[in-house]
Image (cartoon, rainbow, N blue to C red):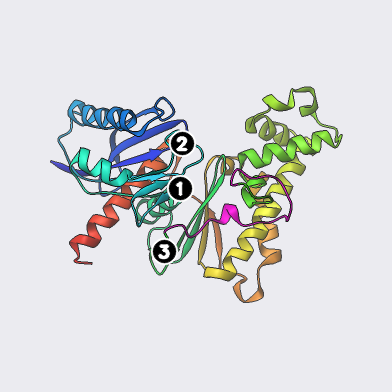
Amino acid sequence: MTRVTVGIDIGGTTTDFAFVDRDGACLAGGSMRTDAHADIEPYLGELVGSIERCKSDSSLSLELIGCGIGAPNANYFTGTVDHAPNLSWKGVVPLAALLSEQLAVPAVLTNDANAAALGEMLFGSAKGLTDFVLVTLGTGLGSGFVTGGELLYGHDGFAGELGHTIVIPEGRECGCGRRGCLETYVSVSGLMRTVRQLLEDGQASSLADQDPTSLKGEDVFTAAQSGDVLALNAFERTGRLLGLALANTVAITSPSDIILFGGLVGSGDLLLKPTQAAFEENLLNIYRGNVNLSLSGLRGSEAAVQGAAALSWKELEQHHDGH
């Protein structure tokens, strides 16, 4: 029998899960709509049913020994999801306890960016690293800080929210209710806001022919690749703000590596070149030449569930070692 943990990645729209072995291989998995259920009970009923069906349908003989969950607003210490703005179930939900009971294995949860950082550490490009920061650049901006080989949770389980550091006072409105947060500028949605702002300012662009509300990240990427000045300018602004924020981050935990992950990273040098330039410019001289800026070693859709499963593997091994 192959011992596996089930990694569950809960997003606002879909929930993905996979059975992951100790080497990070996803052996079987599935997906369901998160937003199809307004309440937690029917959601969990469908999720647990899907996991059990997937396990029994698999041609492999799998022994489930743990469950790891990556979710928005998830608190590692309490095992709860607290008032997640983009999930339909409200309030404080004791998700780890509910899943542990229904799957009959230990369950542990953390926020999605922390899970991604653990995935990098166990299965990706952070193998062997003890001090690094993982930054996820998707619809929003998430981050996981690893110091001395351990994830940084802070006193309450909510440490490491780089996306909610304010970079422009009185700047853009953020979903958190404040203004000027980094993720309102540096994320796929932040990039789109920059593009729409530049179009409103009357900058000439091939994108001006399209309805600004229907523009997608891919449209901006394609325009930038073909030399569109507005699209290149939008990537430049996004990268420069990211580079500045990362240089400030280094001054707090002095990581050896910063790893970038997520949809926006697919734009390659369009984002990386201005990010790297602003990063080097703004680094305090004692850190210069000591920090690697690199891309994730986990690829594609499996990365989030691998990260969640890594959380469970790490927890099981710590308990086994008597910690």
**Numbered range of the magenta stretch:** 157-176
User: Which residue has dot 1 on it?
Assistant: 73
Q: Earlier in the sequence, mark 1 or mark 3?
A: 1
| Quadrant in which the N terminus is drawn | top left
Q: Which secondary structure lies at badge 3?
A: loop
Camera-side residue of 126 and 6: 6
User: Which residue has dot 2 on it?
Assistant: 87
Q: What secondary structure characterizes most of the magenta part?
A: loop
Mark closer to the observer (1, 3): 1
Task: Determine which quarter of the picture holds residue 167.
Answer: bottom right
Q: Earlier in the sequence, mark 2 or mark 1?
A: 1
Mark closer to the observer (3, 2): 2
On screen, residue 219 above or below 317:
above
Question: Residue 129, which numbered label?
Answer: 3
Q: CA distance from mark 3 to mark 2?
A: 33 Å
Percent x, y for residue 107? 26, 47
Task: Determine which quarter of the picture holds residue 18.
Answer: top left
Q: CA distance from mark 1 to mark 3?
A: 26 Å
Q: Earlier in the sequence, mark 3 or mark 2?
A: 2
Q: CA distance from mark 2 to mark 1?
A: 10 Å
Question: Residue 191, which numbered label?
Answer: none
Horizontal relation, residue 211 to residue 93: left or right: right
Horizontal relation, residue 63 to residue 314: left or right: left
Kind of residue at disc 3: Leu
Quick check: is 170 in the magenta stretch?
A: yes
